[in-house]
Structures are given as structure tokens and as C-alpha cells.
Image (tube, helix red, strand yellow):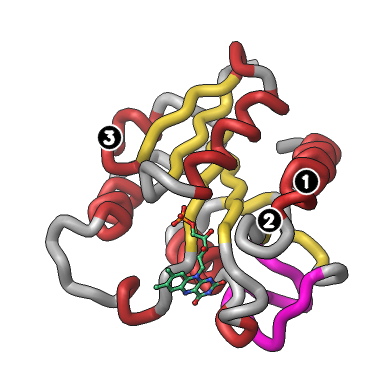
């Protein structure tokens, strides 16, 4: 079995903190951590199993035209990856209390980009136990990745990751 590549952005903050927890739970010997700002298509091509970590900072930031936006650059890499035999799972950081109508939207935006490339995305999560009113991450009643809320429910992060990694294993990720 090859290593799992965890690619996350931004490079500092809750997304990065969670990347370390995921690596600890998966086993540090079988996991590589890379900030998306430090990667290119060839880094992604080196893995069959990829986990992408993202946070939601609002549509206006996402749609910004800044040339140096790390995720915009990352998307150009995604177009150059050979997706055959690759599996992807997504986790996303958000805040249910302050952004209940846009909770972890970025999971959904990333999922749609991957879907457009016919990428197999694993690890959908039922929405039970989350307080939110709307989210672009929901498809057919499930989040298209693991939502985590370090701002309001940090104590749930570790168990949520543990359950999710178990579910991924069951799915054959
Ligand atoms: C300006 C700003 C906008 C945000 N917008 C959203 C949002 O639309 N939806 C959401 O779920 N969380 C939103 N959040 C919360 C962040 O996603 C959350 O704090 C996350 O843990 C940040 O992770 P990071 O530090 O790794 O970027 C926002 C936070 C900030 C500061």
C-alpha cells in the first residue's frame, strides 16, 4: 500500500493543525503532509490516496482574482494530474455558529471542481450532529467531505476524524 498524501491550505491555522491529527491517526510513516502552496502536479501524481484539507472564508475570498491565491494555483495543478486509479477525500474547517448558512461551503466548491474532472471522491458524511441551515457542501443530504468546527466544537475534532478514517477504510479508500 502506498502512502496517503495529505494536501492542505492555508499553511497555518486550523486546517494545518487538523492535517497533523490526520497524519497521527493514519500513522506518520504512511502519510505525507504538504501545504498546497508547496506542491505541483507531480507531487499529486505520486499518490493513489489523497486527502485535501480546506477552510471556508467566504465566497468573496474564493472568487477573488488574486494571482497568488494558493487554491487557484492548486486548481491549475489538478488539471494536470492523471486521475486514473486515484482516490480523494476532503475535510473542511468551518464555523457553524457564525456562518450557519454557508457552513463549510468550500468542501462543496472543491468537490465540484473534482467532480468536473471525474475524480472519485470518498468519505461523504451524514449531516446529523451539525447545526447549520445551509451548505454548498451538501449533495443528496450528505456533506461531500468531513466538516470540522475548531471554533465551536474542538472536542469533537478527534472523534470525528477517527470515525471518518474508519468509514474511509470501509469504503475501500
Ligand atoms: C473572514 C472569515 C470568513 C469565514 N467564512 C466562513 C463561512 O462562510 N463558512 C464557514 O463555515 N466558516 C467560515 N469561517 C470560519 C473558518 O472557516 C474557520 O474559522 C476555520 O477554522 C479557519 O481555518 P483556517 O484557520 O485553517 O483557515 C470564516 C472565517 C473568517 C475569518
Which residue in the protein does label 1 denote? 164
Does the segment drawn in magenta span residue 141?
A: yes
Task: Specify the farthest residue to the top.
Answer: 29
Q: Where 120 falls versus 7 (above or below)?
A: below
- Distance (Cα) linking label 1 and label 2: 7 Å
Residue 39 picture location, percent across and down: 30, 35
* Quadrant housing the N terminus: top right
- Distance (Cα) linking label 2 and label 3: 23 Å
Residue 47 picture location, percent across and down: 49, 28
Residue 77 picture location, percent across and down: 28, 46
Classify mark 3: helix, strand or loop. helix
- Point out the tag, 1 or 3, that comes first from the N-terminus: 3
Does the segment drawn in magenta span residue 1?
A: no
Residue 57 picture location, percent across and down: 42, 70
- Point out the tag, 2 or 3, that comes first from the N-terminus: 3
- At 76% across and 39% down in the image, what residue appears? 165
Query: Which of the 4 image quadrants contains residue 144?
Result: bottom right
- Point out the tag, 1 or 2, that comes first from the N-terminus: 2
- At 77% across and 60% down in the image, what residue appears? 125
Q: Where 122 falls versus 7 (above or below)?
A: below
- At 40% across and 32% down in the image, what residue appears? 34
Q: Residues within 10 Å of mark 2 (few under 14, many from 20)?
A: many
Which residues make up the magenta segment? 130-145
Do tag 1 and tag 2 residues touch (Cβ < 8 Å)?
yes
Residue 146 circle label: 2
- Looking at the image, which is closer to me, 91 or 17? 17
Classify mark 2: helix, strand or loop. strand
In the shown orientation, is residue 17 left or right of residue 123? left
Residue 38 circle label: 3
Amino acid at each position: 500500500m502506498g502512502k496517503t498524501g495529505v494536501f492542505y491550505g492555508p499553511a497555518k491555522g486550523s486546517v494545518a493543525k487538523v492535517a497533523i491529527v490526520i497524519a497521527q491517526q493514519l500513522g506518520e510513516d504512511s502519510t505525507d503532509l504538504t501545504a498546497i502552496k508547496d506542491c505541483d502536479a507531480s507531487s499529486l501524481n505520486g499518490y493513489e490516496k489523497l486527502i485535501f484539507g480546506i477552510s471556508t472564508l467566504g465566497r468573496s475570498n474564493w472568487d477573488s482574482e488574486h494571482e497568488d491565491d494558493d487554491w487557484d494555483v492548486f486548481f491549475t495543478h489538478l488539471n494536470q494530474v492523471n486521475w486514473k486509479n486515484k482516490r480523494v477525500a476532503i475535510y473542511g474547517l468551518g464555523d457553524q455558529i457564525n456562518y450557519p448558512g454557508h457552513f463549510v461551503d468550500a468542501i462543496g466548491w472543491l468537490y465540484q471542481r473534482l467532480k468536473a474532472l471525474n475524480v472519485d471522491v470518498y468519505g461523504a458524511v451524514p449531516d446529523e450532529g451539525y447545526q447549520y441551515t445551509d451548505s454548498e457542501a451538501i449533495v443528496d443530504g450528505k456533506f461531500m467531505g468531513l466538516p470540522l468546527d475548531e471554533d465551536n466544537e474542538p472536542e469533537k475534532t478527534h472523534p470525528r476524524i477517527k470515525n471518518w478514517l474508519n468509514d474511509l477504510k470501509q469504503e475501500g479508500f
